[in-house]
Structure formats: C-alpha cells, structure tokens
Image (tube, helix red, strand yellow):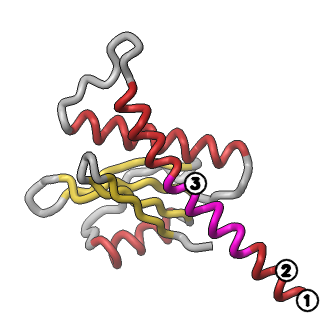
C-alpha cells in the first residue's frame, strides 16, 4: 500500500496530505518531501493518528497533514481517519475566521470534513482493491 496521499480543496485553496506508516517513516518523508527541518512533529507514538500543520519560512500554512500508524478496513481505522479529517477541517475553517458551529449551523465544516475524508477513503479503498487483485493474480 502507498504511504502518502494528497487532497487539494478548491474552495479553501488548501492542501491536505495523508501519511500512513511509523512515526520514523513520517519524519523521514516530511524531511525528504516537504523540507521539514529541526525537531520531529510532536505526535505521541501511542496515538493511532494525528493532524498537524507545517508552516513555510514566512510562518504561513504550507499544508495540512494527517498521520496514521496503519490503515485497514476496520472500524477503528476508519474512525481514526474520520476523526483526523475533522481536526483538519476545523483548523482550515478556523484559520479563515469562520465561526464553525452556531446552533445547528455547521454545514460548511461538515462538508469540508466530509470532502477530505471521502477523498482519502476512496484512495485507500482503491489501493486496497488493487493490492487484493494483484495478490489473486500472483496466486494463480
């Protein structure tokens, strides 16, 4: 399975990356692919996932990131992905000064979180299906 996936949201002009693998693999990927310097991203190794933002040299948001230790078609992993997508959507909306929840008026937040989640879940399911097909072909 691929480790890195990317989503771009046209409405909010923001990039979100999903990385699946160990914390060490995440750190290596961030340094190699996104120019991370200095300390590692502060995500507890005991967490199933995490969401964070990297800033550019001017202190502006460079991109949003979601990290998951693993992903399988299991309720816990799907829940973790959804949970981290919501954290990401909240951060994106908050950075734009949006009051996200007033009474029952959370539609923009719900739509953005759903778009991020749907994009990554589709990519992950496609990758899993491709691997499953390859395993069946290799077995014959």
Q: CA distance from mark 2 to mark 3?
A: 22 Å
Q: 10 Å neighbourhood of mark 1: few (<14), some, or many (≥20)?
A: few
Contact flag, marks 3 and 1 (Cβ < 8 Å): no
Nearest the camera: 15 or 71? 15
Q: Is residue 69 left or right of residue 135?
A: left
Q: Position of residue 135 (x, y in %)?
A: 80, 80
| Labels 2 & 1 near each other (Cβ < 8 A) | yes
In terms of image quadrants, where is residue 71? bottom right
Q: Secondary structure at mark 2?
A: helix
The numbered mark at residue 136 is 2
Q: Nearer the viewer, residue 66 or 98?
A: 98
Q: Is residue 52 visible?
A: yes
Q: Look at mark 3 in the image and give the residue it sits on.
A: 121
Q: Earlier in the sequence, mark 3 or mark 1?
A: 3
Residue on which disc 1 sits: 140
Tell me the quarter of the image containing the N terminus. Answer: bottom right
Label 2 crowd (10 A; few <14 / some 14-19 / many >=20): few
Sequence-wise, the earlier of marks 2 and 3 is: 3
Q: Quadrant of residue 40?
A: bottom left
Question: Mark 2 to mark 1: distance in Å?
Answer: 7 Å
What residue is shown at x 38% (from left), y 23% (from top)? Answer: 106
Label 3 secondary element: helix
Identify which residue is drawn at 71% across, 43% down.
75
* Residue 124 covered by magenta stretch: yes
């Amino acid at each position: 399975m691929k480790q890195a996936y990317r989503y771009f949201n046209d409405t909010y002009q923001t990039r979100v990356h999903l990385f699946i693998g160990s914390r060490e693999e995440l750190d290596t990927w961030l340094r190699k692919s996104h120019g991370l310097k200095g300390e590692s991203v502060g995500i507890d190794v005991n967490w199933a996932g995490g969401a964070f933002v990297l800033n550019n040299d001017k202190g502006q948001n460079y991109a949003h990131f979601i990290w998951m230790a693993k992903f399988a078609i299991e309720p816990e992993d799907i829940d973790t992905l959804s949970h981290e997508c919501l954290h990401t959507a909240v951060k994106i909306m908050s950075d734009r000064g949006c009051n996200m929840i007033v009474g029952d008026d959370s539609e923009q937040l719900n739509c953005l979180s759903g778009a991020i989640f749907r994009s990554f879940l589709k990519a992950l399911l496609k990758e899993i299906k491709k691997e499953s097909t390859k395993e069946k072909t290799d077995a014959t």
